[in-house]
Image (tube, rainbow, N blue to C red):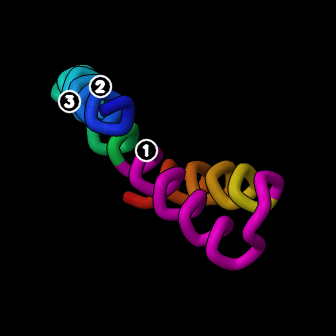
Amino acid sequence: MKTLVAKFALIGILGASLVGCANLDRQQRNTAAGAVIGGAAGHLIGGNTGSTLGGAALGGVIGSQVR
């Protein structure tokens, strides 16, 4: 029962957070996408918190520079 409630809470939080992304400009969207992709790649490569954060930071910087 607790996991069901936690899943619904997570879905609600994710849905509410996406509403805030509706009016981002192109550079902000690229930065966010780069951070997500970089964080996922860092976690897959290193498997720890440091590599995840490093990948997210590097991905965000690269994403902000893409035109």
Residue 5 position in % (x across, y down): 29, 27
Amino acid at the residue labelled 3: Gly
Q: Are the residues tagged 3 and 2 within 8 Å (C-beta)?
A: no
The residue that disc 1 covers is 32
Left-right relation of 34 to 39? left
| Horizontal and vertical percent position of residue 10 | 33, 32
**Mark 1 belongs to which amino acid?**
Ala
Give coordinates of residue 38: x percent, y percent. Answer: 57, 62
Looking at marks 2 and 1 on the same chain, the residue that comes earlier in the sequence is marked by 2
Give the structural element (helix, strand or loop) at label 2.
helix
| Label 1 Cα crowd, 10 Å radius (few <14 / some 14-19 / many 20+) | many
| Residue to which mark 3 is pinned | 15
Rendered image quadrant of residue 29: top left
Disc sitting over residue 49 in the figure: none
Count of numbered labels shown in the rendering: 3
Which residue matches tag 2? 9
Measure the C-alpha gap from mark 3 to mark 1: 16 Å
Q: Name the kind of residue labelled 2 in the image.
A: Ala
Mark 3 or mark 1, which has the lower sequence index? Answer: 3
**Front in this rendered view, residue 15 or 41:** 15
Q: Say if residue 21 shows up in the picture.
A: no
Is disc 2 surrounded by few (<14), some (14 to 19) or many (20+) residues within 10 Å?
few
Classify residue 15 by image quadrant. Answer: top left
- Give the CA separation, mark 3 to mark 2: 10 Å
Q: Which residues are magenta?
A: 30-50
Residue occupying the far right of the picture: 50
Residue 47 part of the magenta segment? yes
Query: Which is more N-terminal, label 2 or label 3?
Result: 2
